[in-house]
Amino acid sequence: MSYQATEQVLDKHKRIALVAHDNQKSALAKWCEDNKSILKRHFLLGTGTTSKLIAEATGLPVKGFKSGPLGGDQQIGARIAQSEIDMLIFFWDPLEAQPHDPDVKALLRIAVVYDIPVANNRATADFLISSPYMNEEYRHQVLNYDKVLEERVKNLNAK
């Protein structure tokens, strides 16, 4: 079974979603402060308190959504699906259970489906932000899931 891919283009000015669990919010705000000179060239979005903390720490504008447990993760996921977010920086806490863990997993899944860069810790975020692709357009192939579903339905109906 082979599926067609569609070309996606990430503009040189990236739309970066910033998300952090409670125990990681200060670490993400610090990372943003350390990388302010790069981040100021991009459009920043974030969930609830995280967006406010980053805006306060950096002085940069950050479009805020709802808190993660109140639907913010889903709002960001929807924008990824609509090609309105190019990158996800999500400092999550691997040592603490989250009441909205299914939302977190859904957000990470949708980021993989739409093949956007994702960092879940500082080291990966450092690698992403220092990539030459941060300052230029990036073209990549994304699996056409409409075709995948169409073929699966066709195969089910053939049985």
Image (cartoon, grey):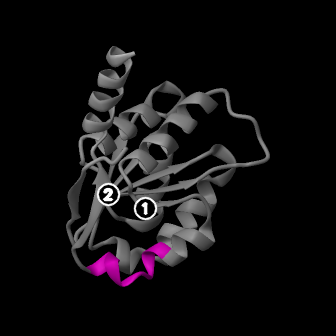
Q: Relative to the observer, which residue lies in front, 151 or 110?
A: 151
Q: What amino acid is at disc 2?
A: Asp
Q: Relative to the observer, which residue lies in front, 74 or 145?
A: 145
The residue shown at (34%, 64%) is: 60
Q: Is residue 21 magenta?
A: no
In the rendered view, would you say 133 is above or below 111?
below
Q: Is residue 111 left or right of residue 123?
A: left
Q: Which mark is residue 117?
A: 1
In the rendered view, would you say 145 is above or below 142?
above
Check disc 2 and report the residue beneath it.
86
Which quadrant of the view contains residue 21? Answer: top right
Q: Is residue 35 left or right of residue 93?
A: left
**Which of the image's four quarters has the N terminus?**
top left
Q: Position of residue 100 (x, y in %)?
A: 60, 28
The residue shown at (62%, 73%) is: 123
Q: What amino acid is at disc 1?
A: Pro
In the rendered view, would you say 154 is above or below 3?
above
Q: Judging from the image, what secondary structure is the residue with disc 2 in?
A: loop
The residue shown at (39%, 38%) is: 77
Q: Judging from the image, what secondary structure is the residue with disc 1 in?
A: loop
Q: Relative to the observer, which residue lies in front, 106 or 30?
A: 106
Q: Is residue 131 magenta?
A: yes
Q: Residues within 10 Å of mark 1 (few under 14, many from 20)?
A: some
The alpha-carbon separation of the residues under discs 1 and 2 comes to: 7 Å
Q: Position of residue 39 (x, y in %)?
A: 36, 71
Q: Residues within 10 Å of mark 2 (few under 14, many from 20)?
A: many
Q: Mark 1 vs mark 2: which is more N-terminal?
A: 2
Q: Position of residue 34 (x, y in %)?
A: 51, 77
Q: Which residues are magenta?
A: 128-135
Q: Are marks 1 and 2 in contact (CB under 8 Å)?
A: yes
